[in-house]
Amino acid sequence: MFLTKQHLVMARTLGVAIVASVGLASCATYKDEFAGINSRLDQLDTKVQGAAQSAESANQSAQQANQRLDQIESRVQKLETAPRRVPRG
């Protein structure tokens, strides 16, 4: 069986079409994979932002607690250095 020029052109065209369709199919697969990865990254980003807000809130609460402790500490030091009162009785 001899291949004519027309058969060779047809075979070449069919080969290019197959390669192109496989290439496009793999692009769609990668597109789906990237979409999945981007979705997971978005979820992680949301969690990280929530954790950062929680950490900032906890930091502010800790700073306020430290300020209150400093105020109490200064009062305690004043009481400790004050002269002793003589008990009545």
Image (cartoon, rainbow, N blue to C red):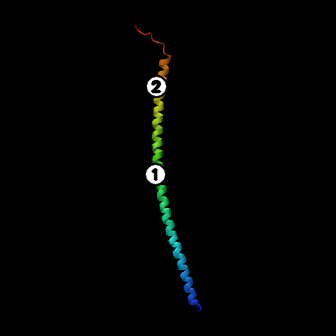
Q: Residue 7: image x %, image y %?
A: 56, 88
Q: Residue 56: image x %, image y %?
A: 47, 41
User: For this view, does 14 lie left or right of residue 88?
Assistant: right
Residue displayed at 47% across by 55% down: 42
Q: Residue placed farthest to the top in the image?
A: 89
Residue displayed at 47% across by 21% down: 76
Q: How crowded is mark 2: few (under 14 residues within 10 Å), some or many (20 or more)?
A: few
Q: How crowded is mark 1: few (under 14 residues within 10 Å), some or many (20 or more)?
A: few
- Element type at mark 1: helix
Foreground pick, 39 / 60: 39
Foreground pick, 33 / 75: 33
Image quadrant occupied by the N terminus: bottom right
Residue displayed at 46% across by 33% down: 64
Q: Earlier in the sequence, mark 1 or mark 2?
A: 1
Q: Residue placed farthest to the front in the image?
A: 1
Q: Residue placed farthest to the left in the image?
A: 89
Whether the residues at callouts 1 and 2 have beta carbons within 8 Å, the answer is no
Residue type at numbered disc 2: Ile
Is 14 above or below relative to 54?
Answer: below
Is 13 above or below relative to 45?
Answer: below
- Element type at mark 2: helix
Q: Residue 9: image x %, image y %?
A: 57, 86
Residue type at numbered disc 1: Thr
Residue displayed at 49% across by 23% down: 74
The disc placed on residue 72 is 2
Is 65 above or below relative to 31?
Answer: above
The disc placed on residue 46 is 1
The disc placed on residue 33 is none
Q: Residue 5: image x %, image y %?
A: 58, 90
Compute the Cα span from label 1 to label 2: 39 Å
